[in-house]
Amino acid sequence: MADEKNIAPEAFPAWEGPAVGLLDLDAFFASVEQLDHPEWRGRPVIVGGSPEERGVVSTASYEARTFGVHSAMPAATARRLCPNAIWTHGHFDRYRQMSDAVMAIIGDETPYVEQVSIDEAFFDVTPGRFSRESPIAICQRIQTRVAELGVTCSIGLGTTKTVAKIASERDKPRGLTVVLPGTERSFLAPLPVRKMSGIGASTEARLRGLGIHTLGQLAEADPDELEAHLGVMGPRLAIRAAGLEQAVVRAAADEDEVKSVSNERTFPADVSDAEDLDATIMHIAASVGRRLRKKGLAGSVVTLKLKFDATSSHTAQQQLAFPTDDERTFGPVAQQLLRRIWHEGMPVRLVGVGVSGFGEAAPVQLSLFDDAEKDQPAADGALSAAADQVRERFGADALQFGYDLRYRDLGVRPRPGKD
C-alpha cells in the first residue's frame, strides 16, 4: 500500500492484472456550497434538515467534522456540537451538475465507469483494456482535474472493487491510496471486518460469534461454517476479504449504445453579446470534439441548447451532410443555429452543444466541383487531432485558440478535460 500522489510517472511500478479505482468526492455537498459561497470557505458548513424540524445531517464540511458532526446525525445534535455552523438545506440541481462534470472527467479516461452514488464511482483503468498508461498516472490526472473544478476527491486504486473502496477511505481528504497487485491480502488482513462494505452491525455480530474480527481471519475461515451461519453470502465475503473477488466494473454504456455526446456551460452572469456566445459555442464544441475522437465516434446531427433562465430551455438541430468528429465542421453549424433561437441582447444563462446521429448521413447530391473542396474537412480534422495530442502531452492549457481566450474572459470556471 502506498501514497503515490507525489511520485513521478516514470517511477511508477509496472501494473499487472486488473486496475480498479474508486473515486469518492470529499464532503461533496458541503464542498460545493463552499465553492459557490467563497465567504463560507474555512468555516463549518452543514447541509441537511433544520434542527427545529427533526432534520438530519446530509453532509458536513471537514471544519464541522472536527466538532464531531457527521452524516446521518440528528440535526439537533449537530447544532449542539457545532453551534456556529452555517446551515443550508442544499441545492441538489447544483450538486448533480457538479457530479456530472466529475463523472465526465472519469469518462474521458475510460468508458468503464460505474457510478454508485452522486459522489462516488468505480472505474476500470486496467492497462491494455482501454489505455496502456499507468493506472496510477491516470488516477493522478483525474484527481488534479477534479480539484480544478473547485472540489476535491479521494481515490483508492487496487485490483478489486473491495480493495479500491477500502483504500479510498484510507486518506481523506485529497488522498490517493494505491494497493499494488500482490499486496491485497496484506492490506486487507489487519482491518476490522466492518471496514468491508456489505458487513453491517448484524453480520459483524455473527462473525464475532465465530471468533472472526479481522478481514484476515474472515479470509481464512472455513467456507462451510460461514455458509452455515451466513448463508451463501458467507463464502463470498471470505473471497472478497482475501482480495480475490471477480466483480467487474460495468461500463455506463457500450459505444454502440451511445446516443449523443454533449457538453454545456452555465455562465456566472448572463451573457448577451453575440461574439461572446460564438466563442463559447466553439469552446464547448472543441470539448465535444475531443470526446468524440477519444470514443471513436462521428455524428451527423448537431444540437444547440440555450437557457434564458433557470426553467426554460430552447434547442435547435441541424442535419449534416456527413458524420464528423471535428469541431471545425460542426462548431460553425452550432453558431448558425444560435441565430435561429436567439437575437442580439437576449440574456443567456446556459449554452450546450451536442452531436448525435452516429454512423448516419443525410443523402447528398454530388457536384462536379466536389473534388475542389473535399480535402478541407480532412485538413481540419488533422489540425484538431494534432491539437488533441498537444493537450494530452502538455496539459489542457498548452494550446488555446482565440475563442478559448474570449470564453475564459467571461469568468466561467474552467472544467478540465473539457476545456
Image: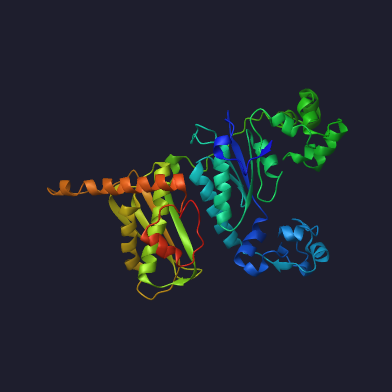
Q: Taking 274 as reference, is 169 above or below it?
A: above
Provide residue 111's location: percent of width, then percent of height. Answer: 50, 41
Q: Is residue 183 above or below residue 28?
A: above
| Residue in the foreground of this view, choosing between 375 and 98 | 375
Identified at 35% across, 74% down, the residue is 344
Residue 84 place in picture, x, y as percent:
77, 69
The colour scheme applied to this rendered structure is: rainbow
Residue 8 screen position, x and y as percent:
57, 40
User: What x and y, as percent, mark residue 210?
Assistant: 86, 30
Residue 124 appears in which quarter of the rendering? top right
Quarter occupied by residue 272:
bottom left
Point out the image quarter for the N terminus: top right
Q: How many marks?
A: 0
Q: Residue at x 72, y 29 (%)?
A: 185
Tell me the quadrant of the picture where the C terminus can be found.
bottom left
Given the current orientation, which residue lies at the most extreme bottom position? 345
Residue shown at the point (54%, 51%) measured from the top left:
145
| Residue 327 visible somewhere in the drawing | yes
Q: Residue shown at 72%/68% (left/top)?
A: 86
Res 305 seen here: no
Quadrant hosting residue 27: bottom right
